[in-house]
């Protein structure tokens, strides 16, 4: 019975987050209202508040779901290339940059920020703990398998640095995706492989 209840609640939360995502893509986060999200999700406004507590809680849930999806893709790319550090790093970074460039929610966040509204941008920048923790965790999990001799502190710093640089290039792209991914993958190789150097 508890599993059924949890499953139903997760479906409810997913429906609400879907509605918030659709409205953010359509009109930016500033245009999203709890009442509008509730109507689009087919629930009461109070239900939205009960599930997420506040508009900030809903924003965090929206950010978390996007991050979880991106990190799952990163894990898959790293797994596909196994111990080939360069190939895995390139595939994961290139996929992240390409998906971000085509992701309507990321576009809405960045477009809103360029227009003077940065309500969701902190989830990628100044309040990016979620992104940094989850993405670095995926890199550390992979590196723990394929670079067992690495110094843990140096490895954590390397993973954090790579993630921060990728996020920076998502927010302010400076070159074509393939070129950026290749340069960042080369840097990742250097950072990761030197963690095992005495």
Image (tube, rainbow, N blue to C red):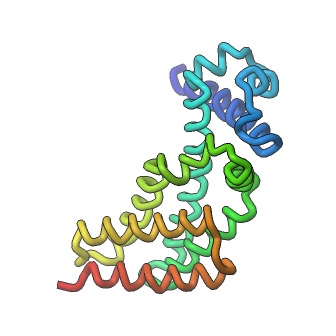
Above/below status of 5 relative to 97: above
| Residue 109 percent coordinates (x, y) | 68, 49
| Residue 55 percent coordinates (x, y) | 61, 27
Tally of numbered tags = 0
- For the N terminus, the image quarter is top right
| Residue 20 percent coordinates (x, y) | 72, 35
Q: Residue at x 68, y 54 (%)?
A: 110
Which residue is at the front of the view, 66 or 27? 27
Q: Residue at x 41, y 83 (%)?
A: 189
- For the C terminus, the image quarter is bottom left
Residue furthest to the front: 116
Horizontal arrangement in the rendering, residue 21 relative to residue 74 (left or right): right
Above/below status of 70 relative to 64: below
In which image quadrant can residue 106 be found? bottom right
Horizontal arrangement in the rendering, residue 172 relative to residue 3 (left or right): right
Q: Residue at x 72, y 57 (%)?
A: 103
In which image quadrant can residue 159 be found? bottom left
| Residue 58 percent coordinates (x, y) | 61, 32
In which image quadrant can residue 64 be found? top right
Q: Residue at x 51, y 22 (%)?
A: 2
Residue furthest to the left: 198
């Amino acid at each position: 019975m508890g599993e059924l209840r949890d499953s139903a609640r997760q479906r409810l939360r997913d429906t609400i987050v879907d509605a918030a995502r659709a409205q953010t893509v359509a009109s930016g986060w500033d245009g999203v209202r709890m009442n509008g999200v509730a109507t689009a999700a087919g629930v009461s406004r109070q239900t939205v508040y009960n599930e997420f507590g506040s508009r900030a809680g809903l924003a965090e849930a929206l950010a978390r779901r996007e991050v979880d999806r991106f990190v799952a893709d990163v894990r898959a790319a790293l797994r596909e290339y196994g111990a080939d550090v360069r190939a895995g790093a390139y595939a994961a970074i290139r996929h992240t940059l390409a998906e971000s460039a085509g992701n309507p929610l990321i576009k809405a966040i960045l477009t809103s920020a360029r227009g003077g509204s940065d309500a969701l941008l902190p989830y990628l920048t100044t309040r990016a703990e979620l992104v940094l923790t989850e993405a670095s965790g995926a890199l550390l999990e992979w590196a723990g398998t394929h670079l067992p001799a690495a110094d843990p502190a140096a490895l954590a710093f390397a993973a954090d640095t790579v993630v921060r640089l990728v996020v920076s290039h998502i927010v302010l792209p400076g070159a074509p995706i393939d070129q950026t991914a290749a340069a960042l993958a080369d840097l990742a190789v250097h950072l990761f492989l030197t963690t095992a150097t005495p």
